Image (cartoon, rainbow, N blue to C red):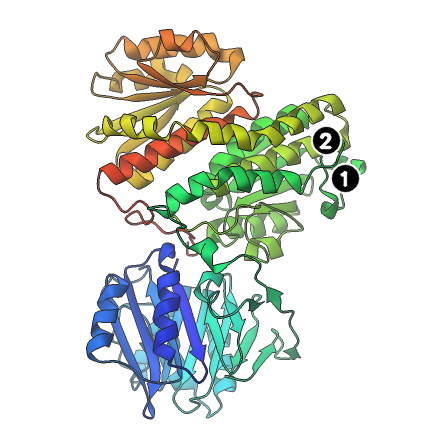
Amino acid sequence: MCGIVGYVGSGEASEFLIDGLRRLEYRGYDSAGIAVYENGKIQIVKKKGGLANLEAVLKEHPLHGHIGIGHTRWATHGQPSDVNAHPHGDCHNHFVIVHNGIIENYMTLKKELIEKGHVFKSETDTEVVAHLAEELDDGNFLSTVRKVLAKIEGSYSLVFMDDSDPDTIICTKKDNPLIIGLGKGENFIASDIPAVINRTRQIYIMNDYELAVVKKDSITFYDHDDKEITKEIHEVTWSAEAAEKGGYPHFMLKEIYEQPKAIHDTVQIYLNKDGSVNFKDLGWTEDCFDDIDHILITACGTAYHAGLVAKHYIERFVRIPVSVEIASEYRYSNPLTTSKTLCIVVSQSGETIDTLAALKEAKRLGAKSLAVTNSISSSIARESDNVIYTMAGPEIAVASTKAYTTQLVALLLLALYMGQLRKTVKPELVKEITDALKDLPKQIEKVLKENDYMAEVAERLIKAHDIFYLGRSIDYAIAMEGALKLKEVSYIHAEAYAAGELKHGTLALITEDTPVIAVATQDNVSSKMYSNIEEVRARGAEVLGIGYEDDAEIGKYTTETVRIPRVDPFIAPILSVIPMQLLAYYTSIKRGNNVDKPRNLAKSVTVE
């Protein structure tokens, strides 16, 4: 969640730090600050609230220097405030740091440091690290940092400054992302690529426990055993413009409209010319599944909903039982995972801390692992035995859209591929579905033409207190995603229910003031779905149906209907979610919300 930036060079550090933090605003934050070495001291300026608050202070009291660090904070320990904002220093600001993560043993360390005379200014766990550096200082910056790391427990990306070594920044990470941008006569540190993309396309991606000594003309890396190592330079291939709005009023709308291309790109890289699926990089063979009797899918939020859809895909085409677990619950559930389990983890960022922890637990229990992610070289990608990448490109809005639909595409292709290997799906059916996937971008473009209509529907929802989503079979999983999308950006209470469960309690909540969104794309349960719609209509609810354009029946039961092209029932979830994304977007902006950065939420959840 927190954003980290650092600069060492000949230019004005403040200029890069503020620009980099601005490019990381999508991660969500409640305060911001920078520290710059100026006139023999490390000067810190930090403010609660948006980056504009920090900029206002710097306009009155600018910091000038060629080395500095910056941070946008998402509170975990201590209220959002000026004093709790990062960067944090020791008693005399000899050591100043920024941190993303949680220091789990900070209370024990803080007590020990207070007993030794250290005076703490904040309520944060992070400040302990700065005081610990002061306490352990042996006159050598690198040696001192190593001593600090030996004392702390938890997850972290840490960036250190030392006023006795004003040409150097030292950084390290464990379970939280950190990259270093390589410049000419200057180098950059950040928690994510967008912070540096306008300055450099050459980056180093740090691995857990690695330590980097960053100067303006050199970067030296050390491994966990303090041995100097050489790292590969990665070339960033997407443009700076890709992280901008591109003429759209909001990132969320831009990313909704980018879905045809994202899906096209994801489909193309995994298909053979004959229509079969090819994940050759996995190195799997038919006998890989001889010892697999269970597939576990674990994820959080939107990615969890993608996993629920994937359960239908895999059980239909692979014929292996699948369980889908919320990652934050999985590792505390005494799971029955064994060496005969294939664990599939799904994460847009590849840095979701709960999902990463679930992956590590599944591997500890002997499971084989596969990641589905949009982020190359992310923590989850590196931790997994194998990786499938989606081609969504950078997604800036907090509410996931194109990352979600490309996850569905990748998971459907994966299920077909596994079915090919196990010979549990006929080649003709594989080709039928992959041909349909090739047509999907054009069909999404057709659904996007319902944009104005969804804006009209949203106008009628903005004063609702509760909105219910209904679906059966795969449509229930999609209804869950539709409800999540609406509530996270509009702040209207929305819940999804399996339509057949209405009579078991939920029907008591339905009144004429309760709008209902009903998804009906699965023909094998359509008659049952229509009956459920009649049940809520009989209680006075208005119902927006989402169904096929050639379905003559659905309009007889709903108040109004959004029509989507007729597609294979396994592709329908990818198409039917598009109008729900638009509905959430327009409901949010018509209520005056910040649709790209909903309150209390962040794009990448990197603390537990």
Q: Earlier in the sequence, mark 1 or mark 2?
A: 2
Q: Which residue is mark 2?
A: 275
- Residue in the image at 77% along x and 35% along y: 290
Image quarter in which the C terminus is found: bottom left
Q: Position of residue 104 (x, y in %)?
A: 41, 64
Q: x and y percent of residue 447 in the render?
A: 45, 27
Q: Is residue 366 visible?
A: yes
The kind of residue on which mark 2 rests is: Gly
Question: Residue at 39% across / 67% down in the picture?
Answer: 20
Residue shown at 25%/20% (left/top)? 509
- CA–CA distance in space, label 1 to label 2: 23 Å
Q: Residue at x 30, y 67 (%)?
A: 32
Give the image quarter of residue 67. Answer: bottom left
Q: Which residue is mark 1?
A: 288
User: Is 35 on the left-hand or right-hand side of 590?
Assistant: right
Is residue 319 in view from this perspective?
no
**Is 172 left or right of 229, judged from the image as shown?**
left
Name the quadrant containing residue 7: bottom left
